[in-house]
Image (spheres, grey):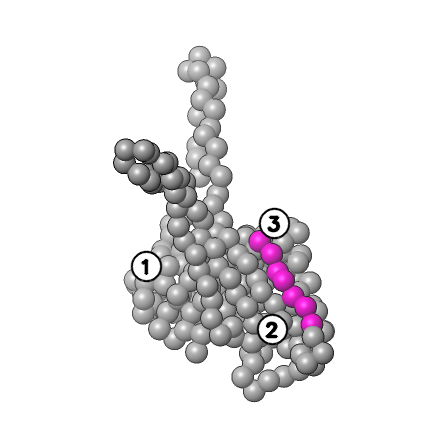
Amino acid sequence: MFEFWLKNEVEGINLLLPITPPEYIAEYGREIEVIRSMDQGDINLSGHKIPQSISISSFFPTREYIFGKKPTVGVSGVMDYTHLIKKWIDDDSIIRLVIADEKGARVNERFKIQSIKYGEKREDNGDIPYTIELRQYTPLNIAAVQTSPVQNAARPQDKQPPKPKQYTVAKGDSLSKIARKVYGDASKWPKIYEANKSMIGKNPNLIFPGQVYVLP
């Protein structure tokens, strides 16, 4: 059974979509410029890579369904779900989308929410159908401005703090297995959990291949 998670790792909010979408649609590609030549016909020139986009459709329930998921965020009404999504859009939040089942994650990447479309019809009985459009997050890399050696000659070099060690989750891993590999002691898994709680969420048993953890 699939689960769809929207995780705001900065705020530590993990939203499990209460009604599992029946499908998701992903789009991945590259821009292609077509040049028309009298001699050779159409010539395709590859352009920039298009960030992956994913579309998810389901509904937010106004009552409990036997096939529904228990809320993982505090909601007092059905519109609280849409308010949270709209807030993340307004805040330009980076959201980790995780689509996974017991076999592992189909999707586990960072996105920005481009839009949410929602509405209501009489026959919906208060439920709110929606479609969420997400586009893959690509960080902007700005090259550092180099200064001349003369300017830096009289300034002592600042010691850079050591980079924290990291571990990439593999298929079949658990926190105790990772602790045994890293520390030689499976009982030290809570150290890893506490250091990565915002990514993992409330359930330390729910980890996914591809996640990168900081090792304290």
Q: Quadrant of residue 62?
A: bottom right
Determine crowd level at label 1: few under 14, some 14-19, many 20+ residues with C-alpha closer than 10 A.
some
Which numbered disc flags the more N-terminal residue, 3 or 1? 3
- Position of residue 70 in the picture relative to residue 30 (left or right): right
Task: Specify start and end residues of the magenta stretch as a single range.
Answer: 114-120
Q: Residue 130, percent across and down?
A: 61, 67
Give the farthest residue toward the top.
Answer: 150
Q: Which residue is label 2 attached to?
A: 59
* Nearer the observer, 9 or 141: 141
| Res 170 visible | yes
Which numbered disc flags the more N-terminal residue, 2 or 3? 2
Q: Which residue is label 1 attached to?
A: 182
Q: Residue at x 28, y 33 (%)?
A: 39
Amino acid type of disc 3? Answer: Asp
Q: Are marks 3 and 1 in contact (CB under 8 Å)?
A: no
Residue 77 circle label = none
Which numbered disc flags the more N-terminal residue, 1 or 2? 2
Q: Quadrant of residue 162?
A: top left
Q: Is residue 116 magenta?
A: yes
- Position of residue 201 in the picture relative to residue 107 (left or right): right
Amino acid type of disc 1? Answer: Val
Q: Which residue is label 3 attached to?
A: 92
Q: Residue at x 31, y 69 (%)?
A: 172
Q: Residue at x 53, y 56 (%)?
A: 134
Disc 3 element = loop
